[in-house]
Image (cartoon, grey):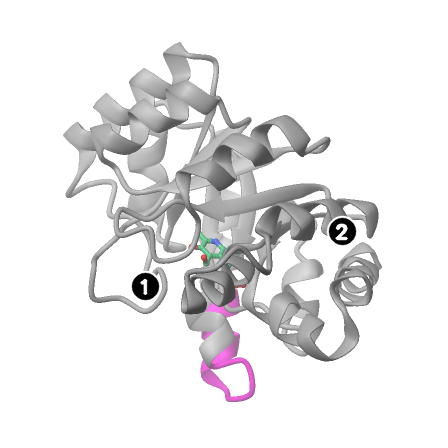
Amino acid sequence: MRLGVNIDHIATLRQARMTNEPDPVYAAVIAELAGADGITVHLRQDRRHIQDRDIELLRTIIKTKLNMEMGISMEMVKIALKYKPDTCTLVPETAEEVTTTGGLDLTMYSEKVAEVSGNLRAAGIEVSAFIDPEIDQIKACHRLGISVIELNTGEYARNWNNSYAILELEKIKKAVVYARKLNIKILAGHGLTYQNVKPIVEIEEIEELNIGHSIIANSTFMGLDLAVRRMKKLIQA
Ligand code: PXP
């Protein structure tokens, strides 16, 4: 299973002082050298962490794969077309949220998603949609011609140490089976930690995990290199 490392929170720390350190570009290099298979950044409309300059530099420096998470706005489409990340992951975005909460509702926003994903695909950018593990969302994905999904593991992660996690895991597994039948490539992420990642790793059809907060949090104590290596080891088993 591949590991995409989300480095947004390196930028969160930098923005706390509006200074130039720590630099997420350094973080991307260290993460790649430690074995990350891709780097993910979320350019939010309010620019609370990642800045346009980061995307520009990351595009030239990253040797693996740059995945830009973005809300479904034409402002973000323009930026993606300028810097051409390898993948754009469409996510819901509201100003009040602390982090992405819930998957993008592809049935409610189907027209906007069709417009945004059409523009990105026309420029040769792979489009992925961050969705909840619901069959209706996968059907909508298929209708919209989106061939990659990132399943939201947030609900599972929040409940991983109580019995509700079993139900959430079952939902994820059902969604995986359905998506595979439609030939959709499956990634997953949100809320995954060193403690809760194992049952998700055991779902073979999931090709890649995007993990940010837990890796960056642990890096403050053990360093980013070791934090990435430890996660990579867990998800490779
Ligand atoms: N995937 C998506 C779509 C996200 O928005 C995020 C958070 O930015 C992640 C994965 C990573 O989540 P976490 O930081 O909880 O590991």
Residue 30: which disc?
A: 2
Q: Quadrant for residue 215, please give it.
A: bottom right
Name the residue type under label 1. Answer: Thr
Query: Of all residues shown, which one is farthest toward the top?
Result: 122
Residue 205, horizontal then vertical, whole percent: 65, 45
Q: Is residue 47 in view from this perspective?
A: yes
Q: Residue at x 36, y 64 (%)?
A: 99
Q: Residues within 10 Å of mark 1 (few under 14, many from 20)?
A: some
Region rendered in magenta: 159-169
User: Residue, x 78% and y 57% (percent of image)?
Assistant: 232
Secondary structure of the residue carrying tag 2 is helix
- Mark number, residue 218: none
C-alpha distance separating marks 1 and 2: 28 Å
Q: Amino acid at mark 2?
A: Ile
Asked if the magenta segment contains residue 24, the reply would be: no
Residue under the image location 32 percent in, 63 percent down: 101
For the C terminus, which image quadrant? bottom right
Q: Which residue is mark 1?
A: 101
Q: Is residue 7 left or right of residue 113?
A: right
Q: Nearer the viewer, mark 1 or mark 2?
A: 2
Tell which circle, 1 or 2, labels the residue nearer the N-terminal end.
Answer: 2
Instruction: Tell me the crowding category of disc 2: few under 14, some 14 to 19, or many 20 or more residues within 10 angstroms, Cα based.
Output: some
Label 1: element kind: loop
Q: Nearer the viewer, residue 186 or 80?
A: 80
The image shows residue 228 at horizontal and vertical percentages of 75, 60
Residue drawn at x 78%, y 75% is 222
Q: Position of residue 43 (x, y in %)?
A: 39, 44
Residue furthest front in the image: 19
Residue 144 visible to an observer of this rendering: no
As drawn, 38 above or below 201: above
- Residue 163 on the magenta segment: yes
All told, the count of numbered labels is 2
